[in-house]
């Protein structure tokens, strides 16, 4: 038997394994109702909404151990059967991950189980302390002997424990079983850390034909892949990757869209796999020809098969259709027509496209086929099915006279069989507690009941007329909270379009002048008021209440960008259809007077302060002029664990942008929430005054990741200059200036090459300023200005003195003082305070 050997470095994480695939079992539980308030989890953590099915699962699982699998004579490629599912063993390549991660999204309650095997070499017999970390359950055996069954099962909330393990001299066989109940987004991973420096080695069985040196070269090759730019606009997509051998090198690239809810069924149809052969000394790869696939944010997984061992690494980028950037039609009807054609030509075969096909009377058979396929997800009550079901109900009503009898019957059966709210029993894992999901469920309930008043709705046991009454009651409660609090997931490019989908559909299907119709109009007006205030050069690039990496980097393709295009001709045409669909299908027109906030004149600046969200969730501060924007969530949960909140953002345009975070995981393109760039492992104390933000980080000792970092893609700026912890970024005469108290180190290798700037240290202060280069006479002069900032960091306060002698003090109560006086008095109202000045203030 051949072996792959790896040292266990001083950090001590055992992260080299021979692993099985993830074995799955669809679970059924006793149907139950749920309790809770919409949006409360964003304030108190998602664990407050533990599904009853988890309690039932945990109770049963703790009564028995997973079965032991003897893998010590196995190697890569051998088949292993669990739950009557045969899957091959594979070598796990961590690419910077300290553990084994198989996280994913599961639309239905699903039991997950996987195994990992590694042999640990110890120079002597010894008692060693291992730290185990997981959100699910870890069962551990060493040398065939049971060691522990650690079963927190805390649903995406990491727990740790320490155990003592007896290792013999020589090689020790370690088997790990990881299991959990998947409920939609599922952090399915484990980490095992050996406490202390014991000089252990890890080894994995492999086929005799495998040469470890070749494998190391391939791994390093994939570890160094990167793109030169952050967007490809109708041009060849070039990946930097070096052939490590003096002979042709074969690989595959799997291309998947960043948006996981584009289809309810058969999402594999959205995946494109391409094969390539690289010649010796080749160091770039032409992945795609111009406009070869639909525009969007994509993940590219580079996959190499070496002697049956699969090595794969993921990286992302944004593809833009140049033709889309040329669309600036003056009339609303023209813009709707262009958006309609974009959906028809570039959107996937989903319910949204089916609605557009029926609207224009084109290919009804194709439209019905799409809906019938997508209905399976509704019948199974898959999570996110509400995103599609509301469009199906719209289709049922608007196109009733032309759709087939079969489709009518299938839609009616779906409507009477659905679970609409938490007061109805269920054993699914549909998520009800986000503002956008709650809205869609209420809309579906109200509309379905009104269309089928005399039908018995099976899940609630109520007739349609009663279902409508309950739906209207819930909608009125939802609107009352929305008008009082507005959007808790503030400015979110991911979820504002979903709100528009629900509110816009309700607007389209209610009688003008009716209570719900008027409330829908008022809510849409509020959203477009906020969008206009927060947009810059056609995109919303601000602090976010909830975000993903694709939203952070994919501004041309964001749903809010298409909303701004249709409503005001200020954004860009794209194929994002969730939010723009009700605008296309209806007659809503956004208030024209808001457009002045979206398109500032050359000599104007705008400052906007407001408070919004569940129980005054967040205080927001925005500064922008015609050239640049800076946005901050003021004093948001400082020094607490974060989720997907994005605190400070600076932007010159859609790709020339910069932001800072404490990474939620240690490797790029992971699946964590927070992940490497989106969200914060630990949140900072951040404040802003005019065009300057001050960000203080305090990361506790128990947190493994002890640095913060800046995203600033150098390729997207026309110039940059850096020294002594200061970075000046310039484009089109505007600048973003950044200073980190602990210094900056530019990453010069791997996927984040020339776009990541690391600042080490658990306690750190960052300063971000935006403005016009000409006001300072150039980047070097501006660097001298940033050097003049004096920064003092203490346990309870942070003191900053700027180049003019202005003194800023931040205290632990989240206040900002300037010369001893409070800089502002939060909370503001939801609508907030707008200052629209006549000359730039930065």
Image: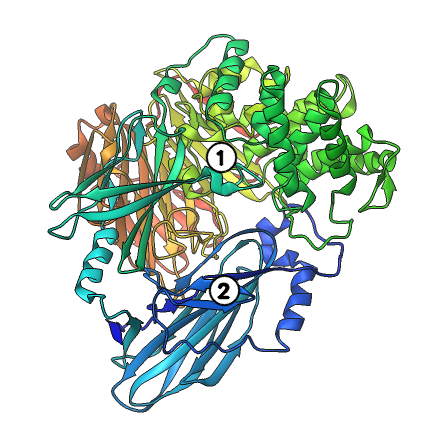
Residue at 31 percent of width and 91 percent of height: 125
Judged from the image, the secondary structure of the residue bearing numbered disc 1 is loop
| Contact? badges 1 and 2 (CB < 8 Å) | no
Instruction: Tell me the residue that label 2 is attached to.
Output: 158
**Rendering coords of residue 353 (x, y %):** 56, 26
Residue 437 located left or right of residue 489: right
Image quadrant for the C terminus? Answer: top left
Give the number of marks: 2
Q: Residue at x 65, y 56 (%)?
A: 49
- Could you classify mark 1 by the number of other residues whose Cα lies within 10 Å: few (under 14), some (14-19), or many (20 or more)? many
| Distance between mark 1 and mark 2 Cα atoms | 27 Å
Q: Which mark is residue 493?
A: 1
Q: Secondary structure at mark 2?
A: loop
Image coordinates of residue 753 in percent, x first then y, are 23, 45
Closest to the observer: 299 or 369? 369
The image quadrant that residue 74 belongs to is bottom left
Across and down, in percent, residue 291 comes to 34, 26
Q: Say above or below: 107 vs 397.
A: below
Q: Quadrant of the N terminus?
A: bottom left
Q: Would residue 532 be seen by someone viewing this image from the given angle?
A: no
Instruction: Using the image as rendered, state which of residue 718 and residue 334 is in the foreground.
Output: 334
Instruction: Say which of 566 and 720 sits in front.
Output: 566
Quadrant in the rendering for residue 212: bottom left
Specify the farthest residue to the top. Answer: 331
- Specify whether 139 is left or right of 508: left
**Number of residues whose C-alpha sits closer than 10 Å to that of mark 2, classed few (under 14), some (14–19) or many (20 or more):** some
The structure residue drawn at horizontal position 25% and vertical position 53%, both measured from the top left corner, is 223
Among numbered discs 1 and 2, the one appearing first in the sequence: 2
Q: Is any atom of residue 380 visible in this view?
A: yes
Q: Position of residue 209 (x, y in %)?
A: 22, 67
């Amino acid at each position: 038997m051949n072996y792959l050997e790896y040292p266990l470095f001083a950090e001590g994480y055992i992260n080299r394994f021979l692993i099985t695939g993830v074995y799955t079992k669809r679970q059924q539980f006793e149907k139950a109702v749920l309790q809770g308030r919409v949006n409360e989890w964003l304030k108190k953590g998602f664990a407050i909404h533990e599904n009853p099915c988890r309690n039932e699962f945990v109770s049963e699982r703790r009564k028995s151990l997973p079965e032991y699998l003897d893998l010590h004579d196995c190697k890569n490629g051998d088949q292993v059967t669990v739950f009557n599912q045969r899957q091959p063993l594979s070598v796990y390549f961590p690419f910077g991950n300290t553990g084994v991660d198989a996280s994913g999204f599961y639309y239905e309650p699903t039991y997950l189980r996987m195994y990992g095997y590694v042999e640990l070499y110890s120079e002597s017999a010894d008692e060693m302390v291992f730290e185990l970390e997981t959100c699910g359950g870890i069962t551990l055996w060493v040398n065939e002997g049971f060691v522990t069954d650690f079963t927190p099962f805390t649903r995406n909330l990491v727990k740790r424990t320490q155990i003592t393990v007896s290792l013999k001299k020589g090689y020790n066989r370690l088997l790990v079983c990881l299991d959990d109940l998947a409920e939609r987004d599922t952090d399915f991973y484990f980490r095992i850390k050996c406490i202390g420096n014991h000089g252990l080695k890890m080894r994995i069985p492999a086929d005799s034909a495998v040469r470890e040196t070749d494998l190391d070269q391939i791994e390093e090759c994939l570890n160094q892949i990167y793109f030169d730019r952050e967007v490809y606009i109708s041009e060849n997509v070039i990946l930097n990757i070096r052939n490590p051998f003096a002979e042709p090198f074969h690989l595959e690239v799997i291309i998947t869209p960043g948006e996981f809810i584009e289809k309810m069924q058969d999402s594999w149809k959205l995946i494109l796999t391409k094969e390539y052969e690289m010649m010796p000394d080749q160091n770039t790869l032409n992945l795609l020809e111009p406009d070869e696939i639909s525009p969007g944010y994509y993940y590219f997984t580079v996959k190499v098969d070496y002697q049956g061992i699969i090595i794969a690494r993921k990286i992302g980028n944004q593809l833009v259709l140049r033709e889309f950037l040329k669309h600036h039609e003056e009339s609303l009807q023209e813009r709707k027509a262009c958006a309609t054609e974009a959906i028809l030509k570039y959107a996937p075969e989903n319910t949204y496209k089916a609605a557009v096909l029926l609207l224009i009377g084109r290919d009804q058979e194709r439209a019905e086929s799409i809906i019938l396929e997508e209905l399976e997800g509704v019948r199974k009550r898959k999570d996110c099915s509400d995103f599609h079901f509301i469009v199906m109900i719209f289709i049922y009503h608007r196109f009733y006279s032309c759709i087939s009898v079969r489709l009518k019957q299938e839609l009616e059966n779906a409507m009477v069989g659905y679970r609409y709210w938490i007061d109805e029993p269920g054993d699914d894992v549909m998520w009800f507690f986000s503002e956008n999901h709650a809205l869609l469920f209420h809309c579906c309930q109200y509309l379905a009941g009104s269309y089928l008043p005399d039908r018995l709705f099976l899940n609630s046991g109520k007739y349609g007329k009663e279902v409508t009454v309950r739906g209207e009651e819930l909608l009125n409660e939802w609107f009352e909270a929305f008008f009082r609090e507005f959007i808790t997931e503030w400015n979110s490019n991911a979820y504002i379009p979903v709100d528009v989908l629900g509110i816009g559909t309700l607007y389209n299907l209610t009688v003008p002048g009716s209570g719900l119709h008027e409330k829908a109009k008022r809510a849409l007006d509020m959203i477009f008021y906020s969008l206009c205030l927060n947009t810059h050069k056609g995109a919303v690039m601000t602090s976010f209440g909830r975000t993903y990496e694709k939203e952070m980097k994919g501004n041309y393709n964001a749903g809010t960008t298409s909303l701004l295009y249709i409503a005001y001709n200020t954004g860009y045409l794209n194929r994002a259809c969730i939010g723009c669909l009700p605008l296309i299908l209806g007659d809503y027109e956004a208030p024209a007077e808001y457009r002045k906030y979206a398109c500032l004149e050359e000599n104007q600046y705008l400052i906007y302060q407001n408070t919004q969200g569940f129980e005054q969730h967040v205080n927001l501060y925005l500064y922008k002029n015609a050239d640049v924007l800076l946005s901050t969530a003021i004093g948001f949960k400082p020094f607490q664990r974060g989720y997907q909140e994005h605190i400070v953002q600076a932007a010159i345009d859609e790709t020339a942008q910069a932001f800072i975070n404490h990474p939620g995981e240690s490797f790029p393109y992971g699946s964590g929430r927070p992940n490497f760039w989106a969200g914060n492992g630990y949140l900072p104390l951040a404040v802003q005054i005019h065009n300057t933000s001050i960000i203080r980080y305090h990361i506790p000792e128990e947190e493994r990741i002890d640095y913060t970092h800046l995203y600033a893609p150098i390729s997207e700026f026309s110039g940059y200059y850096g020294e002594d912890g200061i970075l000046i970024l310039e484009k089109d005469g505007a600048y973003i200036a950044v200073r980190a108290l602990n210094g900056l180190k530019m990453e010069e290798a791997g996927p984040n090459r020339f776009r990541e700037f690391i600042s080490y240290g658990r306690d750190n202060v960052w300063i971000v300023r935006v403005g016009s280069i000409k006001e300072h006479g150039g980047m070097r002069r501006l660097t001298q200005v940033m050097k003049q900032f004096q920064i003092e960091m203490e346990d309870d306060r942070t003191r900053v003195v700027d180049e003019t002698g202005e003194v800023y003090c931040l205290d632990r109560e989240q206040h900002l003082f300037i010369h001893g006086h409070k800089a502002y008095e939060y909370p503001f109202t939801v609508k907030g305070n707008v200052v629209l000045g006549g000359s730039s203030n930065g």
